[in-house]
Image: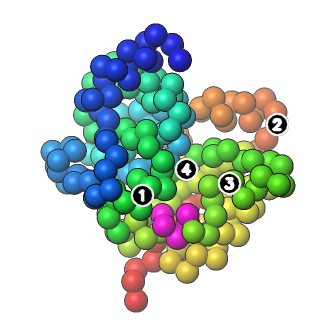
Amino acid sequence: MTEGQRRALDELLPRWGVDFTPAPIRQVALFGRIAPLVVEIGFGAGEALAARAAAHPDQDHLGIEVHRPGAGRLLLELEKLGLTNVRISTHDAVEVLSQQIEAGALDRVLLFFPDPWPKKRHHKRRIVQPGFVGLVASRLKPGGCFHLATDWAPYAEQMREVLDACPTLRNAHPGWAPRPAERPLTRFERRGERLGHQVFDLEYLRLAAR
């Protein structure tokens, strides 16, 4: 962690951070308004989140990242850009979703380049599992989107199998989704390109309750 990131966590997290409490957060209390709410899980260094929030001031963004140096980097970027439509949680994403986000509250959930845990004995550690996908789906509004990306082909296939099996989600495309033009080329994608990896995007929509 750099000195700048440490300063950001000490001085800026109280402004942009969201404390974990086992109770639903109130969007008006956090952002001073009701607007489309986007959650990014595991935002890394935060470059994609900051760029998206700057491009969409009409949306509110909650980023979740347990890696504190990455949170520090994003905080420095938020300070530089003066963004008011972003908040950060450094708590476990599953607990945040299950205890702090109400059912049907989210317009989009983003999960870009999660750890692929490539060794077979570690596959159970992958975040995209049936229980997690069901939790995300329950937090989306009808028509809300769960957008995922990975550059690890076997993980992409597993993601698609798990998402296809979720009864409350449907694939928004016949197969893989197009890469969104607004997502900046992050260090994860640049690394994947250097290694010759293809990037796979998936977009699944929340079905309306019957």
Question: In this picture, which residue range is highlighted in magenta?
Answer: 132-136
Residue 41 placement, left or right of 103: right
Mark 4 — residue? 111
Q: Residue tagged by mark 2?
A: 196
- What secondary structure is the magenta-colored segment mainly? helix
Q: Position of residue 168 (x, y in %)?
A: 50, 78
Are circles 2 and 1 on residues that touch, CB within 8 Å? Answer: no
Separation of disc 1 and disc 4 at Cα? 13 Å
Q: Nearer the viewer, mark 2 or mark 1?
A: 1
Residue 148 appears left or right of 76: right
Q: CA distance from mark 2 to mark 1?
A: 34 Å
Q: Are there few (<14), some (14-19), or many (20+) residues within 10 Å of tag 1?
A: many
Q: Which residue is mark 3?
A: 126
Mark before the other along the chain sequence, 2 or 3? 3
**Secondary structure of the residue carrying numbered label 3:** loop
Quarter holding residue 210:
bottom left
Mark 2 vs mark 1: which is more N-terminal? 1
Is residue 112 visible in the rendered image? The answer is: yes
134 falls in the magenta region: yes
Which residue matches tag 1?
97
Earlier sequence position, callout 1 versus callout 3: 1
